[in-house]
């Protein structure tokens, strides 16, 4: 089974397990959201594997609410408070983010922590080949994604009040350790390649360190595109953001070029020049030009690391399927991709070992 963008895009009625008290929310917004005027209508966005997201509609304005899901949660997961902090911190930079209004940490209001931000009226595309775009539009979108990520990695995180947003060193070692633990906490089957990656990666981290704000899950379907220009007007889903290594973040985004369309909405095997989409090499070169890098060393290591990391994230989704707390109806299909992604991650290591 394959999914289309219509499976993930748009809104639906709020799922039974994600119901929220509209009266309690409206009362809260009356006191905490400047300019809010009811009445309030609530619907749920189809997308989002981790934190349920809601459209809040009033006669004059639309908002988005993101909250922690109910039920048993992994330690440090579903960090909507961190999302709120980084989006708010980036408000006056070149990074396209929605305006934020408030963070509610009191579970007595809606049952779990949540925050409210502006609704950005654009389009979210899920297939990176963007088949209904023209070549010129595809080229514009990819260039805009590249520019937005370069802008993020160029932000002075101390100047925007995010110097305490994470530890500024040893990002890769900490991430490998974190995702190994998260993977083990949600393990539902033995995946030999994951075990090999967890053993090999910590001992082969490249020398050198850089620090910037990192998004942690930057890809086409976590951006909002302008309906006309097709440029990025908002970066979405900041749950995994922290201070970290910008190349680790950028290479995660570039996995798109190494994954097949049927595995994880990738571009591998497609005739990119005929679509107006840059090759992996061209895309990396554009990022390097924007960020002042001459080149990027150890690229295959970063790819192996990120495939391991994404496999761990997908295993977390499968763990939530087993626990009954997954927020998306497509969660089981997503979780099932952990194993083939781990296999591809180990293939990257084998390429390094052959050199």
Image (cartoon, helix red, strand yellow):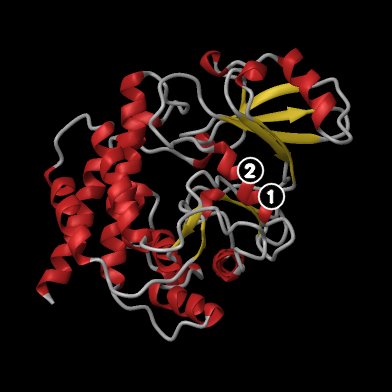
Q: Secondary structure at mark 1?
A: helix
Please tell me whether residue 113 is drawn above or below residue 134 in the rendered image: above
- Relative to 56, is 220 on the left or the right? left
Q: Residue at x 74, y 47 (%)?
A: 99
- Relative to 319, is 132 on the left or the right? right
Which residue is nearer to you in this view: 342 or 110?
110
Q: Are marks 2 and 1 in contact (CB under 8 Å)?
A: yes
Residue 345 numbered mark, or none:
none
x, y percent for residue 326? 42, 25
x, y percent for residue 187? 23, 32
Q: Residue at x 39, y 59 (%)?
A: 252
Pick the quarter of the image with the N terminus: top left
Question: Residue 58 is drawn in which quadrant?
Answer: top right
Which residue is nearer to you in this view: 93 or 339?
93
Which residue is nearer to you in this view: 146 or 261?
146
Q: Secondary structure at mark 2?
A: helix
The residue that disc 2 covers is 84
Q: Residue at x 16, y 58 (%)?
A: 200
Please tell me whether residue 31 is drawn above or below residue 100 in the rendered image: above
Which residue is nearer to you in this view: 13 or 154?
154
Pick the quarter of the image with the C terminus: bottom left
x, y percent for residue 48? 51, 36
Q: Gap between marks 2 and 1, in whole Å?
A: 6 Å
Q: Residue at x 42, y 21 (%)?
A: 325
Residue 88 numbered mark, or none:
1
């Amino acid at each position: 089974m394959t999914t289309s963008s219509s499976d993930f895009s748009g809104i639906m009625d709020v799922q039974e397990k994600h119901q929220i008290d509209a009266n309690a929310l409206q009362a809260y917004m009356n006191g905490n959201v400047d300019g809010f005027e009811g009445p309030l209508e609530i619907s749920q966005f189809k997308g989002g594997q981790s934190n349920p997201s809601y459209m809040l509609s009033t006669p004059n304005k639309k908002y988005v609410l993101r909250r922690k899901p109910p039920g048993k949660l992994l330690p440090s997961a579903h960090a909507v408070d961190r999302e709120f902090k980084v989006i708010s911190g980036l408000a006056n930079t070149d990074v396209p983010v929605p305006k934020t209004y408030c963070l509610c940490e009191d579970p007595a209001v809606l049952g779990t922590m949540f925050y409210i931000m502006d609704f950005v009226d654009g389009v979210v595309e899920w297939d990176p080949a963007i088949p209904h775009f023209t070549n010129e539009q595809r080229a514009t979108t990819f260039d805009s994604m590249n520019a937005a990520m370069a802008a993020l990695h160029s932000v002075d995180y101390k100047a925007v009040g995010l110097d305490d947003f994470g530890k500024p060193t040893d990002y890769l070692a900490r991430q490998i350790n974190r995702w190994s633990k998260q993977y083990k906490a949600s393990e539902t089957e033995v995946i030999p390649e994951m075990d090999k990656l967890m053993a090999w990666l910590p001992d082969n981290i490249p020398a050198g360190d850089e620090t910037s704000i990192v998004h942690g899950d930057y890809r086409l379907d976590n951006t909002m595109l302008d309906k006309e220009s097709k440029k990025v007007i908002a970066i979405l889903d900041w749950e995994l953001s922290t201070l970290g290594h910008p190349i680790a973040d950028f290479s995660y985004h570039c996995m798109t070029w190494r994954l097949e369309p049927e595995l994880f909405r990738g571009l591998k095997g497609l005739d990119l020049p005929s679509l107006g989409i840059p090759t992996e090499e061209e895309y990396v070169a554009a990022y390097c030009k924007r960020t002042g890098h001459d080149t990027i060393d150890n690229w295959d290591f970063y790819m192996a690391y990120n495939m391991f990391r994404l496999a761990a994230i997908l295993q977390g989704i499968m763990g939530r399927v087993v626990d009954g707390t997954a927020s998306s109806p497509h969660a089981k299909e997503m979780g099932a991709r952990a194993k083939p992604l781990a296999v591809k991650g180990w293939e990257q290591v084998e390429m390094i070992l052959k050199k």
